[in-house]
């Protein structure tokens, strides 16, 4: 009788234990939440960003026109080339015969030179390279596809140099060029962001 009673208690205890384990494992969202709570670094940024310099703002570039920015011996400029390719370049002016670094490009161009191309920051929020007037879709070579409703005010483009510092390695900051599309007097879209630390 005692053995039967002991066996019954053991069976009941094991059943309760297994059910408890099953209930704990049936809630993966709870497990993920606990993991997130135990890993607060996943929600903390250790990088601070400082704006160092900003170029003038323009709403259009025609062929061979440039948007320039001089900083710390670097000549940084966006240019609409004769083949209608929009390219961002940099050159270290402190080094004799310094190479010209290609930082970014649309890589959309014509197989022949053209003098009627233009880059336009539009009221609809889009940044577009057209081969010729009028500014219609059939003349489009490249676009940022950042159009929005309602229209934006004061659409323009600009260049910036920013410094990014990691709190865990503050002695080795990095420097970036940003090519930015503006609208409504604020930054709407970073078209390109390139690390220039190694060429300065």
Image: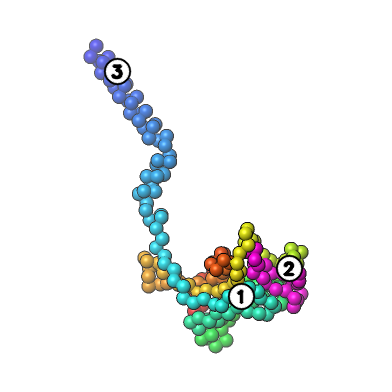
Q: Earlier in the sequence, mark 3 or mark 2?
A: 3
Magenta segment: 110-134
Residue 8: image tag: 3
CA gap between label 3 and label 2 equals: 86 Å
Q: Is residue 43 above or below residue 164?
A: above
- Can I make out residue 153 in this image? yes
Q: Which residue is mark 2?
A: 135
Question: Which residue is situated farthest in the bottom direction here?
Answer: 96
Please tell me whether mark 2 sits on a helix, a strand or a loop.
loop
Image position, residue 65 (x, y; %): 66, 80
CA gap between label 1 and label 3 equals: 85 Å
Q: Is residue 86 left or right of residue 114?
A: left
Q: Which residue is mark 1?
A: 58
Q: Quadrant of residue 97?
A: bottom right
User: Is 89 in front, or is 151?
Assistant: 151
Q: Quadrant of residue 184?
A: bottom right
Image position, residue 122 (x, y; %): 65, 67
Q: Earlier in the sequence, mark 1 or mark 3?
A: 3
Q: Is residue 170 above or below residue 72?
A: above
Q: Quadrant of residue 189?
A: bottom right
Image position, residue 137 (x, y; %): 74, 63
Label 2 close to label 1 by CB (< 8 Å): no
Q: Residue at x 36, y 65 (%)?
A: 168
């Amino acid at each position: 009788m005692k053995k039967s009673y002991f066996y019954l208690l053991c069976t009941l205890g094991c059943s309760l234990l297994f059910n408890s384990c099953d209930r704990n494992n049936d809630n993966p969202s709870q497990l993920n939440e606990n993991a997130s709570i135990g890993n607060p670094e996943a929600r903390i940024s250790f990088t601070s960003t400082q704006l160092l310099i900003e170029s003038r703002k323009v709403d259009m570039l025609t062929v061979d026109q440039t948007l320039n920015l001089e900083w710390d011996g670097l000549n940084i400029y966006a240019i609409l080339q004769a083949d209608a390719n929009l390219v961002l370049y940099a050159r270290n002016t402190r080094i004799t015969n310094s190479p010209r670094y290609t930082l970014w490009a649309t890589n959309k161009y014509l197989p022949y030179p053209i003098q009627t191309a233009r880059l336009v920051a539009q009221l609809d929020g889009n940044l577009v390279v057209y081969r010729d007037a009028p500014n219609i879709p059939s003349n489009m070579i490249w676009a940022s596809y950042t159009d929005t409703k309602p229209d934006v005010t004061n659409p323009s483009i600009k260049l910036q140099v920013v410094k990014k510092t990691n709190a865990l390695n503050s002695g080795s900051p990095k420097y970036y060029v940003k090519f930015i599309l503006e609208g409504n007097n604020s930054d709407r879209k970073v078209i390109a962001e390139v690390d220039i630390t190694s060429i300065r």
